[in-house]
Image: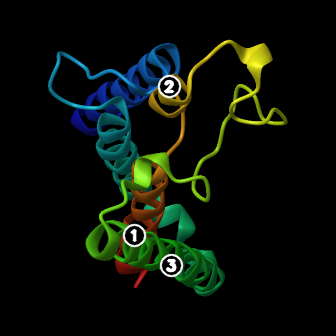
Amino acid sequence: MKQDIWLILSTLVLIFSISYGLMSGFTSEILGMIKPITVFQYSCFFTFALLLNKYLQKLNPYKEKLLTIGFLFLLASGYEVLWNFFFWFSNYGFYGINTDIDEITYNDLRHKFVLPFNLSLNITETEYFENKPVNLNINSKISFLVFICSLYFIFKLH
């Protein structure tokens, strides 16, 4: 019963972080202290861990197949985590380039097929980069979340 209460609370925090992040464009902070993507990352792992612990006994018959799937996710997310960190260190560490304004990792969800500084958008170059919804920070946090969830999944199944 206690675990169900924690699961409900964690799920509510997860839903709040997603909706707050989408409404603010992931640019503002919750209570002026923490980014919505960080709250999402923590609450998502907590919810995943609680659900896994709740249904672990039911997953035992499929243990070998699930371990293979877990290692697949670990491989894919591990590559992404390493790529993000190497990319950040190679650009920011060596050249002093801010990775938040990098076109390679930029994923504009609002104007996907529009050139960045098109006059029809009526936005400046600075506004374009400041208001983008997804950047290397968000990509890294989601990749690391999948990596840790995969590691925890393998740990609990083994």
Q: Is residue 53 above or below residue 116?
A: below
Labels 1 and 3: the sequence-earlier one:
3
In three-dimensional space, the C-alpha distance between marks 2 and 3, rounded to whole angstroms, equals: 31 Å
Q: Secondary structure at mark 1?
A: helix
Q: Quadrant of the C terminus?
A: bottom left
- What residue did someone put label 3 on? 74
The residue drawn where x is 47% and y is 46% is 101
Q: Quadrant of the N terminus?
A: top left
As rendered, which of 52 and 133 lies closer to the eye?
Answer: 133
Tell me the crowding category of disc 3: few under 14, some 14 to 19, or many 20 or more residues within 10 angstroms, Cα based. many
The residue drawn where x is 45% and y is 29% is 130
Q: Is residue 145 above or below residue 106?
A: below
- What residue did someone put label 2 on? 131
The residue drawn where x is 79% and y is 15% is 120
Q: In the displayed structure, does residue 136 sit left or right of residue 125?
A: left
Q: Position of residue 121 (x, y in %)?
A: 73, 16
In three-dimensional space, the C-alpha distance between marks 1 and 3, rounded to whole angstroms, equals: 25 Å
Labels 1 and 2: the sequence-earlier one:
1
Q: Position of residue 97 (x, y in %)?
A: 37, 60
Asked if the residue under mark 3 is in contact with the one under mark 1, i.e. CB atoms within 8 Å, the reply is no
Q: In the displayed structure, does residue 53 sit left or right of residue 70?
A: left
Labels 2 and 3: the sequence-earlier one:
3
- What residue did someone put label 1 on? 91
The residue drawn where x is 42% and y is 17% is 20
Amino acid type, mark 2: Asn
Q: Position of residue 24 (x, y in %)?
A: 45, 16
Q: Residue furthest right?
A: 113
Q: In the displayed structure, does residue 34 sit left or right of residue 62?
A: left
